[in-house]
Image: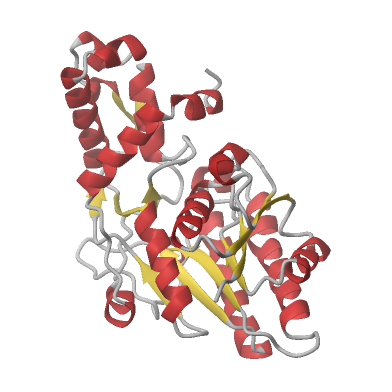
């Protein structure tokens, strides 16, 4: 039986990957994609879906409750997957208001729309509101501590993570108070195609190709658990298909790396590519590899940011045990695929950097 999905934030990094994933896996399902097209939302991320049967792009804001209600009714939406969020920690430190407005007030607006259509109207159709959140709501881990688990106490340390924690609580409350059929997933750091180049991996990748400095906070010892975005999409699919309503599932990559080690691996892989593919030197003459130099020479340590959490790691044992989840990509293979994508899609990332 085909479904009708509303995907919020669908022109952003993870939302776009999920839209492509879902269309490829379930081509008969209708996809209504909603995005406000702010700085990190790019309709070009969805270009391959334009014109596909059942695909509808809507330029709009999740805070527009009337718009969302209208979409749910018009398209008979039975599944809402909520990605839309302000997500860059540095931006949340310098300008937290946008994070409160989008991540808390915007999520509440979506919940009100879903309640109005799915619960307060005639009948109570089968439905699912899936909320995509982050491991950052749990705070920071000590060096030897086990990974974050679903019942872990929330201890957000940045305006971004605090706003996501608040939205998680609202989703839970709408289930327990009103009976909205919800699930939540908290994921580790994603990387892969269509990743906006302000984040660590795409920033460093594109900076190497342009011969620019690679900024690393502090001494680079901060640790993150990295998840290839397609593995994240598969995890959400499993939760939508077999996850228990009202429950939370942590989706991780079982893949912890120091930030400096990530940057060094990326540099080394790019060096190897330039050595093996002489044509790259003509395409990217400013890159160190074009001159036979190591990209590691671009690494620069910069002042650490305020409230920088030292370590994140996900314990994904619940989703593995209950739903059969396992990431398919190692970090090394995922980085290779990511580099391939950025080489093949220079026309996508160059305009975003003002080139």
Count every numbered label the image shows and give the total. 0
Q: Nearer the viewer, residue 239 or 271?
A: 239
Answer with left or right where residue 119 lies relative to residue 222.
right
Q: Can residue 302 be seen from the camera position used here?
A: no
Q: How is the image coloured?
A: secondary structure
Q: Nearer the viewer, residue 205 or 104?
A: 205
Answer with left or right where residue 39 lies relative to residue 318.
right
Q: Residue at x 38, y 63 (%)?
A: 234
Give the percent coordinates (x, y) of residue 119: 73, 85
Q: Residue at x 55, y 69 (%)?
A: 131
Q: Can residue 72 be seen from the camera position used here?
A: yes
Give the percent coordinates (x, y) of residue 211: 35, 16
| Residue 126, above or below 280 | below
| Residue 117, above or below 132 | below
Q: Nearer the viewer, residue 309 or 44?
A: 44
Q: Quadrant of the N terminus?
A: bottom right
Give the percent coordinates (x, y) of residue 341: 37, 35
User: Which quadrant would residue 220 be assigned to in this image?
Assistant: top left
User: Which quadrant would residue 127 be assigned to in this image?
Assistant: bottom right
| Residue 67, above or below 204 | below
Give the percent coordinates (x, y) of residue 70: 80, 66
Answer with left or right where residue 298 lies relative to residue 74.
left
| Residue 153, above or below 224 | below
Answer with left or right where residue 152 lies relative to residue 156.
left
Q: Residue at x 78, y 67 (%)?
A: 74
Q: Residue at x 46, y 65 (%)?
A: 137
Q: For the view shown, which residue lies furthest in the right direction? A: 66
């Amino acid at each position: 039986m085909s479904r009708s999905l509303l995907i919020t934030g669908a022109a952003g990094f993870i939302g776009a990957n999920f839209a492509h994933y879902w269309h490829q896996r379930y081509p008969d399902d209708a996809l209504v994609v909603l995005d406000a097209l702010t700085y990190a939302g790019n309709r070009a991320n969805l270009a391959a879906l334009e014109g596909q049967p059942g695909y509808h792009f809507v330029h709009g804001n999740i805070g527009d409750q009337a718009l969302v209600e209208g979409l749910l009714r018009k398209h008979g939406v039975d599944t809402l997957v909520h990605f839309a969020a302000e997500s860059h920690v540095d931006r949340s430190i310098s300008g937290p208001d946008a994070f409160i407005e989008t991540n808390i007030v915007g999520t509440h607006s979506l919940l009100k729309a879903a309640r109005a259509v799915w619960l307060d109207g005639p009948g109570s159709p089968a439905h699912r509101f899936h909320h995509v959140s982050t491991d950052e709501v749990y705070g920071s881990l000590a060096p030897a501590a086990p990974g974050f688990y679903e019942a872990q106490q929330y201890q957000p340390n940045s305006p971004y993570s605090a706003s996501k924690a608040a939205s998680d609580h609202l989703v839970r409350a709408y289930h327990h108070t009103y009976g909205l059929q919800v699930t939540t997933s908290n994921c580790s750091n994603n990387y892969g195609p269509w990743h906006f180049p302000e984040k660590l991996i795409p920033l460093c990748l594109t900076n190497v190709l342009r011969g620019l400095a690679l900024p690393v906070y502090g001494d680079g010892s901060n640790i993150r658990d990295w998840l290839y975005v397609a593995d994240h999409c598969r995890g959400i699919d499993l939760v939508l298909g077999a996850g228990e309503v009202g429950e939370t599932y942590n989706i991780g990559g079982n893949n912890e790396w120091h930030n400096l080690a990530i940057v060094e691996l990326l540099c080394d892989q790019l060096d190897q590519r330039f050595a093996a593919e002489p044509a790259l030197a003509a395409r990217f003459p400013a890159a160190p590899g074009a001159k036979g130099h190591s990209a590691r020479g671009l690494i620069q340590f910069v002042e650490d940011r305020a409230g920088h959490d030292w370590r994140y790691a996900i314990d994904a044992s619940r989703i593995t045990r209950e739903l059969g989840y396992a990431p398919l990509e190692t970090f090394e293979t995922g980085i290779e695929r990511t580099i391939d994508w950025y080489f093949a899609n220079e026309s996508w990332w160059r305009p975003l950097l003002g080139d």
